[in-house]
Image: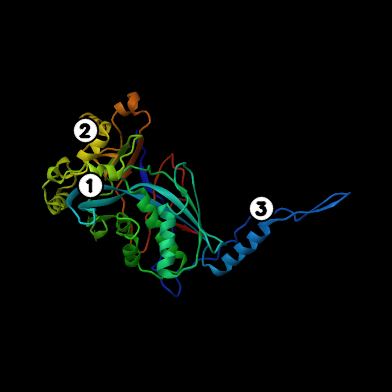
Amino acid sequence: MASSHLLCNHNLFFPPCSKKSPFSITPPAKLQFQRTPSVKTSKKQHEIVYDPDERLNKLADEVDKEAPFSRLTLFSPCKINVFLRITNKREDGYHDLASLFHTVSLGDIIKFSLSPSKTKDRLSTNVSGVPLDDRNLIIKALNLYRKKTGGSNFFWVHLDKKVPTGAGLGGGSSNAATALWAANQFNGCVATEKELQEWSSEIGSDIPFFFSHGAAYCTGRGEIVQDISPPLPSDIPMVLIKPKEACPTAEVYKHLQLAQTSKVDPLILLEKISRNGISQDVCINDLEPPAFEVLPSLKRLKQRVTAAGRGQYDAVFMSGSGSTIVGIGSPDPPQFVYDDDDYHDVFLSEANFINREENEWYKELISKPTSQHPEASATFE
């Protein structure tokens, strides 16, 4: 059975940003590195040993003196598209869309530390296959922030990855938004959230959404974000089911035929959801048919989840360009996912809708008793 959720009860409040005094926080303990003796002695000889940690400790001491805090841990949630209409192909090759984006409780944990380096960020992660250089949206976001503000901070960043890639859940976009928000905190909040949102569209279409409060009607390429009041209760459970195979977004759009997309006005879909909640008829995704062409097994997965979950799910649909199938109404996957060998390596996660408060970043919902991240809310050190 799925475990219950409760909001992590030790989140620290992010006060409104102020250029004069962005935080009222006790100065942190100095960064510590294990020191090795600089001289080894014996009865017969004296050996001089070079100790690079000495230099790093001195640099870290200088960082601690100048910074109001030196470490920050943030939750980076993913999103689902409750509906996704593709309305037009643009002259620049992109497509116009209209979609209800909503953040959910599955997410990554990102730890930021001020680096003594004045030339380079350093990124590490717990999974293989994630680029650690400037191909990663986290590094792109930090470079963008310095370009826009003239800031000089560089960072050590550790990404604890929970959101699968190639899933249509916007995990990388969320990471980028989280990095921009973190860099702004370290820099005394010299940029407004509106500016961060506008800048972020330069490196990704889905990134601006995460500067909403968690629910938004998005148009254009996705970068035009209309923040809306949460249309759905946070206690609605859902299950996310992602097969091992991914759906390359570019391939999905290559197979898209606009003449075969839905003709329903997306504003009518938004109105129905706001008034009546989620049902199968409003959870339209125009990218499902082309995604099913790219990955036929995904179509079979959705069909099986729909058939097995009658009476269990209010709606079953694909998020984004795939390959995640979302079942709204229950946190439990259908039994065949456990019994059928074809699905032994699928990714499964329960989730809920979440939002964020003004001047705060998103907070993690902690699952008991299996939570691995008691520190996963936003915390300063």
Marks 2,1: beta carbons within 8 A: no
Q: Amino acid at mark 3?
A: Gln
Reading the image, the residue beneath label 1 is 82
In the rendered view, would you say 24 is above or below 57?
Answer: below
In the rendered view, would you say 177 is above or below 108?
Answer: below
Tell me the crowding category of disc 2: few under 14, some 14 to 19, or many 20 or more residues within 10 angstroms, Cα based. some
Q: Is residue 184 visible?
A: no
Q: Quadrant for the N terminus, please.
A: top left
Q: Position of residue 207 (x, y in %)?
A: 33, 56
Q: Amino acid at mark 2?
A: Thr
Q: Amino acid at mark 1?
A: Val
- Image quarter of residue 262: top left
Separation (CA) of disc 3 from disc 1: 49 Å
Determine which of the numbered discs, if any, sits on residue 306 in the image: 2
Marks 3,1: beta carbons within 8 A: no
Separation (CA) of disc 2 from disc 1: 16 Å
Of the two numbered discs 3 and 1 on the same chain, state the one appearing first in sequence.
3
Which of the two residues, 78 or 30, is positioned nearer the viewer here? 78
SS category of the residue bearing label 1: strand
Q: Position of residue 203 (x, y in %)?
A: 35, 58
- Image quarter of residue 27: bottom right
SS category of the residue bearing label 2: helix
**Residue drawn 37% across and 61% down?**
360
Reading the image, the residue beneath label 3 is 34
Q: Farthest residue in the right direction?
A: 44
Which of the two residues, 232 or 210, is positioned nearer the viewer here? 210
Of the two numbered discs 2 and 1 on the same chain, state the one appearing first in sequence.
1
